[in-house]
Amino acid sequence: MPTDADIEEDAQITDLDKERSRLWWITADFVPDGYNRLLYAEVERAAA
Amino acid sequence: MRLPGYSYDPRTHAYRNLATGRFLSREAITDLLRDVADGAGNRLAALGRSAVRGEITPRKFYELMQREVKYAYNAAAALAAGGWDRLTQGNWGRNGFLLKTQYGYLRDFAADIAAGKLTEAQAAARASTYGDSAYSRYWELDRQKQETAGVTMARWQTAGDDKVCVECQALERQGVVLLSRLPNPGTVHPGCRCDLVYEK
């Protein structure tokens, strides 16, 4: 089982975690069609 | 080809579809949140069943769960914040703090599986509650934004169907009350998918 130190480390949110979280949202089959880009609102606004 | 995207108005806390020019309703966002929490919950439940069946070790179960829960928390927070780029260092830090607590529970969960204390159904039900906690993370951040904007009153809104529990029915019957008197949806019982409706 993980130690307290493992848990402490696991709970850190790294840049890689942030990228994987974005990928998780984009590829999740339970995110309805059309909403995969929703969380990129700020990027899209800047580009619009 | 760039797909049509969205903009986010921090004043009204609303997303706008750039292809149609229309704002997304609050109901559309909370429906989406429910889909995501339920979808994540189902994936987590499948991990719980796999662990009890011995298809993955308890340690692997912990590892897969902790990643999935982290992604669900981060996505729920981004949804409340208005997109990935609106999440602050404080938001990320709060996610990490909350995840640390969840991972402690998750270790106990994995230990219970290792000890043979859980049936497949029990493990699936327990695992899916981590989807509930991601659901509540959205509401925690959403409430914080509303409070910052000066909102002090709200009402509890259930799905209004025959699945609504007694506790949530009672909260809804209170009508409009101080926001501080209402819990975050997702925390009242497993599978809670109620809403907070803010009153300006």
Image (cartoon, rainbow, N blue to C red):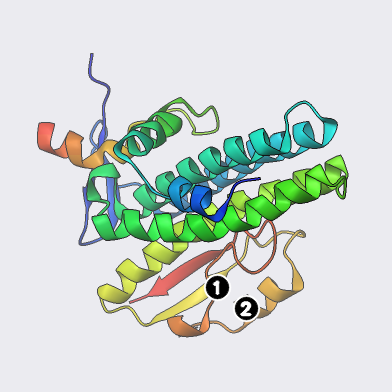
Q: Measured from the top left, where is residue B3 in percent x and y?
A: 27, 22
Q: Which one is earlier in the sequence, the residue at label 2 or at label 1?
A: 1
Residue on which disc 2 sits: B171
Residue at the (50%, 57%) spot, across then down? B100
Residue A47: image tag: none
Residue in front for this viewpoint, B186 or B45: B45
Labelled pair 2, 1 in contact (Cβ < 8 Å): yes
Q: In which quarter of the image is the N terminus of chain B?
A: top left
Above/below status of B64 relative to B38:
above
Left or right, B29 with respect to B164, comes to left
Closer to us: B189 or B65: B65
Q: Where is residue A45 in the image (x, y as percent from the top left)?
A: 15, 39
For label 1, the residue is: B156
Residue B113 location, x and y as percent? Answer: 79, 45
Chain of the residue that carries numbered disc 1 in the rendered image: B
Q: Is mark 1 on a helix, strand or loop?
A: strand
Q: How far apart are marks 2 and 1 (CA)?
A: 6 Å
Instruction: Classify residue B180 as left or right of residue B127.
Output: left
Q: From the viewer's perspective, is B175 left or right of B114?
A: left
The amino acid sitting under disc 1 is Trp
